[in-house]
Amino acid sequence: MKKSIFTLLIVTILSFTSSASTQKQPGENIQKDNYYPQVKFETSMGDLVIELNRKRAPATVNNFLSYVKRGEFNNTLFHRVIPGYIVQGGGYGPEFKVKKASRTIINESGNGLKNEMYTIAMAREDDPHSAKRQFFFNMNDNNNLDPGKTWGYTVFGSVIEGTEVLDKMALVETEYKALIRFQDAPREDVMLIQATVLPEVQ
């Protein structure tokens, strides 16, 4: 009796593991054979193009692409700007309304990509695996955000066009916004008007 129960338990675990391993990630089928998809950001201060690195950060890139494809980043705010450090967005709509997030994703900060100038990385809370939809651009070589004795912040791409737009964003006047309890929020809205997955380069 005990043997049959044990066998049934093993079969159940294997079945569950097999099901989980074949479960598709959001964004996985968006240019699924392209390791370096590109996304265009049309912002209120100009346009920029980001090249993502699916080879080094597959879960993060797939998650990001799923938000882009669903239009979830359209008409969102860059809500945090710290000169010489970061420009952060992806989480708030106009009037700082919180945007819905689907799920947390695994931390891929140990992928060898560094938080260098003009790279894009995932924002998160203290829990290393708490990233959802917010992202930030590094406006310096931020070595303190790389993994070491503790988890770092996952870099998953870099800006290949429009770095001057980020340079302008990083210089906007900021203030404290009580609504989101954030220092360093732009005094005047800086908007991500539309994010688009660009056609695959042949």
Image: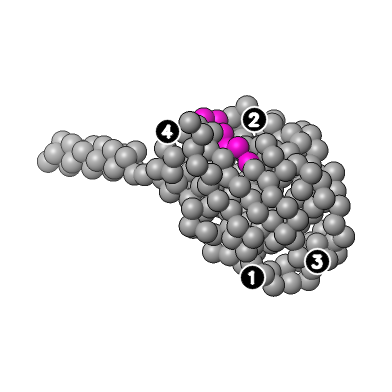
Residue receiving disc 3? 188
**Which residue: 61% across, 47% down?**
40
The residue range painted magenta reads: 50-57
**Which residue: 55% across, 30% down?**
56
Q: Amino acid at mark 2?
A: Leu
Q: Amino acid at mark 1?
A: Lys
Q: Which mark is residue 120?
A: none
Residue receiving disc 1? 97
For marks 2 and 4, the one nearer the N-term is 4
- Taking 77 as reference, is 130 left or right? left
Q: Position of residue 72 (x, y in %)?
A: 54, 59
For marks 1 and 2, the one nearer the N-term is 1
For marks 1 and 3, the one nearer the N-term is 1
For marks 3 and 4, the one nearer the N-term is 4
Q: Are marks 1 and 2 in contact (CB under 8 Å)?
A: no
Q: Is residue 55 above or below residue 68?
A: above
Marks 2, 3: nearer the viewer:
3
Residue receiving disc 4? 33
Question: Real-space Cα distance between discs 1 and 2?
Answer: 32 Å
- Taking 38 as reference, is 165 left or right? right
